Image (tube, helix red, strand yellow):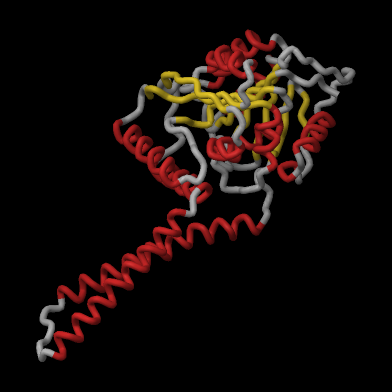
Amino acid sequence: MTQTPLLSIVAPCHNEEEGLREFCRRAVAAARSVAGDAFELILIDDGSSDGTWEIISALAADVPEVLGIRLLRNHGHQLASTAGLSASRGERVLLIDADLQDPPELLLMMMPIMERGADVVYGQRTRREGETWFKLASASLFYRTLSRLASVTIPRDTGDFRLMRRRVVDILLSMPERDRFIRGMVSWIGGRQVALPYERDARFAGTTKYPLRKMINFALDAITSFSTTPLRIATWLGMISAGVAIALLVYTYIRWLQGETVTGWSSIMVAVSVFSAIQLICIGIIGEYLGRLVQESKKRPMFMIETILRGSQRAELPTAFSEMSAGDKRAALDAVLTSGEPPQKNSRIG
């Protein structure tokens, strides 16, 4: 059974071949500064179409601490992150993107905060380099809308970049929903969560993996996962529409009694269009929630791992790995990564 690492760094990767080696170099240096050799760097290839997996394979052969995971297809950032967290065994787990917008060196500042009792230390952006005005404006609108609608307090201007205790990760992994919004789920868990303000760098290489379509889908997942307010808005819109319709009916009846006819088709078309639009909006809101219930009820695997790689050792995990409990996942990992070493427990990080 392999030695239990003190620290796990989890980094989902999708078409990151240009900057992956530099990320590995900086992440390994930061991890060694706080945990010596008792760490693991988990790189998850989320169905990349470039040479990302080949680079991960080469890094795993060169760096003993690197654990490569290749997903069967592209699952998206949140599920790829979940796959990496599921494979982590460290007492502390850092979730970070591989594009180097979030500096791995901040780990040196996060660890002392956690040693003082924090359960989660999350990065909070004070400035974002290399972003367009549209991306900045839309991100600001999203976080402020979410903070007003969400049933739990989700800090503004934060991503998934955070250091978590093992118990927080295990609770996170026990949450079964497929449409995941990890930063909101971690906020829901509670405990002592501390912000670490930082300036976010521009991408080291490559292009953003979140175009407008994915940003909109991500926002919908976030809002529908942590708020039922849109359903209440739909209810109020329906009640207001009914009230206006009754008022128009009374007005029309009075004009008819007075022997006056309502002229003009424009007003009729406007009224029909407005009410139709409100109805469609309400149906769409309900459909978003209903669609998520349908997806959850299918209970398909959350993610599918094709290969797990450490050094030259390749292995396959059980098909139902994503549905296992946290303890069973670690046991399955130990079984496929057996190195012949006696089990050890290192407690330098309390």
Q: How many labels does the image show?
A: 0
The answer to whether 205 appears left or right of 35 in the picture is left
Residue 245 horizontal/vertical position (percent):
28, 75
**Where does the C terminus fall, quadrant-wise?**
top right
Is residue 333 something one can see in this rendering? yes
Residue beneath the point at 62% across and 19% down: 114
Viewer-nearest residue: 165 or 99: 165
User: Which of the 4 image quadrants contains residue 259?
Assistant: bottom left
**Where does the N terminus fall, quadrant-wise?**
top right
Is 73 rendered above or below residue 128? below
Residue beneath the point at 41% across and 19% down: 199
Residue 315 horizontal/vertical position (percent):
78, 32
Residue 253 horizontal/vertical position (percent):
20, 86
The answer to whether 209 appears left or right of 35 in the picture is left
Residue beneath the point at 65% across and 41% down: 72
Is 151 rendered above or below residue 14? below
User: Which of the 4 image quadrants contains residue 113?
Assistant: top right
Residue beneath the point at 38% across and 39% down: 144
Is residue 316 something one can see in this rendering? no
The answer to whether 35 appears left or right of 48 in the picture is right
